Amino acid sequence: MVVNHTGVTYFVIKGISIAPELQVSIFLLVLLIYVITLGGNITIFLLIYLDNCLHTPMYFFLANLSAVDISISTVTLHRILVNFVTKDNNMGFSACMTQSFFFGSLSGHELFILTAMSCDRYMAICKPLNYYMIMNFKTCSVLASFCWLLGFIQVIPYSVMLVSISCYSSNEIDHFFCDLLPVMKIACSDISVLEALSFIQGIIMFFLTPFCLTFISYFLIINAIIKIPSNIGRRKAFYTCSSHLTVVILLYTTLILQYLILNNSFGSTKLFSLFNTAIVPMLNPILYSLKNKDVKSSFKRELGSIKNKIGLNF
């Protein structure tokens, strides 16, 4: 352990738990979650790409969400798997900073793409006659590109400041990956500016802007649904956004608990980080497939097509 209050060349990632008897169980659980996450999101992505019936704005954004779920799980969970196999919890300084950068940018992108999806649902329900004219391929491409670009840009300022930290009281990170807060906890340099920047930017870029836009969209959506005269029409309208609303509630609840309420508890931080980086990406394809007739129909069509191509009869 580095205790001489100097810079470090590597960090020791302590992981989810340091209890030896839990390591095999943790590895198997994380591996299972990771495989399900990859399988589910890759399936959703391929279905949207292959099936012309799913070439609509809603599924275009869903494909982007699947891409970011695959990326964010890979960036964070792969260290747990690699550390168990290699029995080496050390991570180089550059690798740690790189992981922190990509995790921050991908987390931002997930919030931005969910915001774009809420705006898409608003247009579909509140402006149905102009929906396809406004939400055309060009508009969707620009929105998605902006989400990706903004996700990377917004993390640059505090990433640069994080890399510039020259003094650490320890090189042990009490987390399962290099997240911003755990790294800041072991810094002995003056990080008051970094703390203020990360807090203000987190509030504005991660919560207020996407949260307010999403809240406003759903306020208008619910108001429009209430005015639909028939029960069938109201159920159908709500059905089209129920999966997205469920994902938004899950994600924002855990983020608020993790970063705004329980950020002083390492155990809670790791628990909610694991939920955000593993459980939510795993649940997304399940929620969007089990509750979505179009996705289930597409899966059956593509599965039937594969069976016909390989000449199998079931």
Image: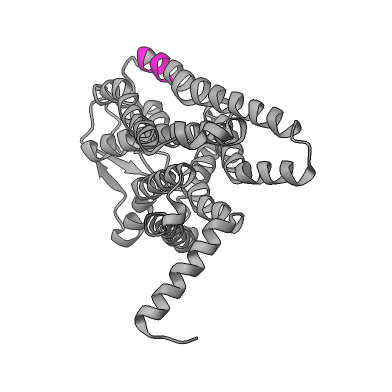
Q: Residue at x 60, y 46 (%)?
A: 243
Q: Could you tell me what secondary structure mostly forms the magenta stretch?
A: helix
Question: Magenta span covers which residues?
Answer: 193-198
Image position of 120 (left or right of 234): left
Above or below, 165 against 60 in this view is above
Residue 133 drawn at (x, y percent): 45, 33
Residue 129, percent from left and from top = 56, 34
Residue 305 drawn at (x, y percent): 41, 73
Where residue 248 appears, x then y in whole percent?
Answer: 57, 37
Look at 58% across and 52% down and name the residue there. 287
Residue 312 can be seen in this image: yes
From the viewer's perspective, is residue 200 above or below residue 285?
above
Does the magenta run of residues contain 1?
no
Of 108 and 141, the residue lying toward us = 141
Let me know if residue 111 appears in the view. no
In this view of the protein, which residue sits in the foreground, 130 or 293?
130
Whether residue 197 appears in magenta in the rendering, the answer is yes
| Residue 269 appears left or right of 64 | right
* Residue closest to the eye, 144 or 177: 144
Which residue is found at the position 45% from the left and 42% from the top? Answer: 57
Quarter of the view holding residue 289:
bottom right
Q: Residue at x 37, y 39 (%)?
A: 137
